[in-house]
Amino acid sequence: MEILLFGITKDIVGNDTLHLGDNASIRTVSDLRKWLLAKYPAMGELRSLAIAVDNRFAEDSDPVHPAAELALIPPVSGG
């Protein structure tokens, strides 16, 4: 399982991708969110964090399969 990282999430992890292998404990977006918060507590300080599965914004109850394309989309600011 590979997760694409953008913005502050890239800074928190220290890379632009995160490789999880075949992590059987992650079956839903909610599982992924819990795993991320346990591994990277600074993610919990973000005002919001959208997760995309296969190029679509996902709900916490949506399933995550090992071949899915995942992306973390942090809050954005502009001017």
Image: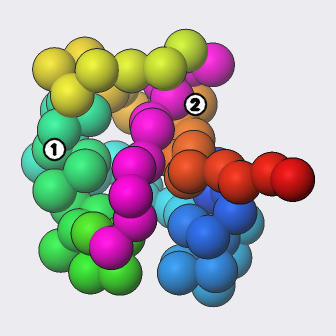
Viewer-nearest residue: 79 or 37: 79
Q: In the picture, residue 50 is in which quadrant?
A: top left
SS category of the residue bearing label 2 = strand
Residue 71: give x, y in percent of width and height: 57, 41
Give the CA distance from mark 2 to mark 1. 16 Å
Classed neighbour count for the residue bearing mark 1: other residues with Cα under 10 Å, few (<14), some (14–19), many (≥20): some
- What is the residue that sits farthest to the right in this orientation? 79
Q: Please name whichever residue, 46 or 57, is drawn nearer the observer in this view of the structure.
A: 46
Earlier sequence position, callout 2 versus callout 1: 1
Residue 75 magenta: no
- Please state if 62 lies on the left or on the right of 53 as rendered: left
Nearer-the-camera pick, 25 or 41:
41
Q: Position of residue 23 (x, y in %)?
A: 26, 51
Residue found 32% across the figure and 27% down from its top: 64
Q: Is residue 20 above or below residue 28?
A: below
Splitting the image into 4 quarters, where does residue 66 fall?
Answer: top left
Q: Is residue 6 above or below residue 70?
A: below
Which of the labelled discs sits on residue 14, or is there none? none
Q: Amino acid at mark 2?
A: Glu
In which image quadrant can residue 47 be found?
bottom left
Q: Residue at x 16, y 44 (%)?
A: 31
- Return the mark for residue 31: 1
The magenta region covers 45-55
Q: Tell me which residue sits at (16%, 20%) in the image.
A: 61
Q: Please give the residue where the numbered disc 2 appears in the rendered image.
A: 69
Q: Residues within 10 Å of mark 2 (few under 14, many from 20)?
A: some
* Tally of numbered discs: 2
Rendered location of residue 16, percent (x, y): 72, 66
Q: Residue at x 28, y 20 (%)?
A: 59
Please indicate, yes or no, whether residue 63 appears anywhere in the rendered image: no
SS at badge 1:
helix
